[in-house]
Amino acid sequence: MEARTTQKIFAKFGELLDNGLGSDVVIEVGKEPNIKKFHVHSIVLMAVSPYFRIAFSSNWVKRFDGIIHFEKPNISPNIFKIILNFIYKADLDLKKHKASDICSLIKASDELSIDVLNEHIL
């Protein structure tokens, strides 16, 4: 597949992340006073993470009106946004981030079992 075609596909996925169209998950990350909700797509997260495949298919996950509600207070909104941009947009330039953010990113991607992100970083 041509690089240009791949870029177009990721641009469309990025639009879905940015506008939330078709999202079926609300993930709340961070701790007071820095909490943010992200409207995402379970199928996208399950495709890249066995952690989310298990979490979203289990009986303990909260569902309201067909929407999965999930909380990850130990991951900051900034780090989770970086993760989502990588998953949806294939966008991650490590040179733009502080070393402490990269360490937090490695920890979060390991916890969430996003191996493709860990491979990209390491």
Image: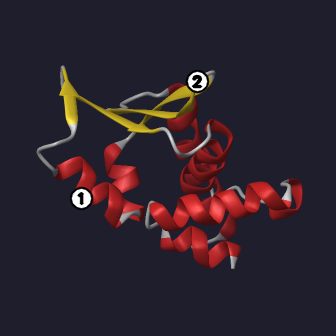
Query: Which part of the image, by quadrant, shows the N terminus?
Result: bottom right
Q: Which residue is mark 1?
A: 54
Describe the element under mark 1 as helix, strand or loop: helix
Q: Is 79 above or below relative to 113?
A: above
Find residue 102 and report its horizontal and vertical position in percent: 74, 61
Q: Nearer the viewer, mark 2 or mark 1?
A: 2
Residue 33 falls in which quadrant of the image?
top right
Residue 105 falls in which quadrant of the image?
bottom right
Query: Does residue 53 appear to the left or right of 37 in the view shown?
Result: left
**Label tally:** 2
* Chain-order first, disc 2 or disc 1: 2
Under mark 2, the amino acid is: Glu
Describe the element under mark 2 as helix, strand or loop: loop
Q: Nearer the viewer, residue 38 or 36?
A: 36
Q: Residue at x 26, y 52 (%)?
A: 55
Q: Residue at x 83, y 54 (%)?
A: 97
Find residue 95 and report its horizontal and vertical position in percent: 88, 62
Q: Is 114 above or below relative to 28?
A: below
Q: Which residue is mark 2?
A: 32
Find residue 47 and report its horizontal and vertical position in percent: 36, 61
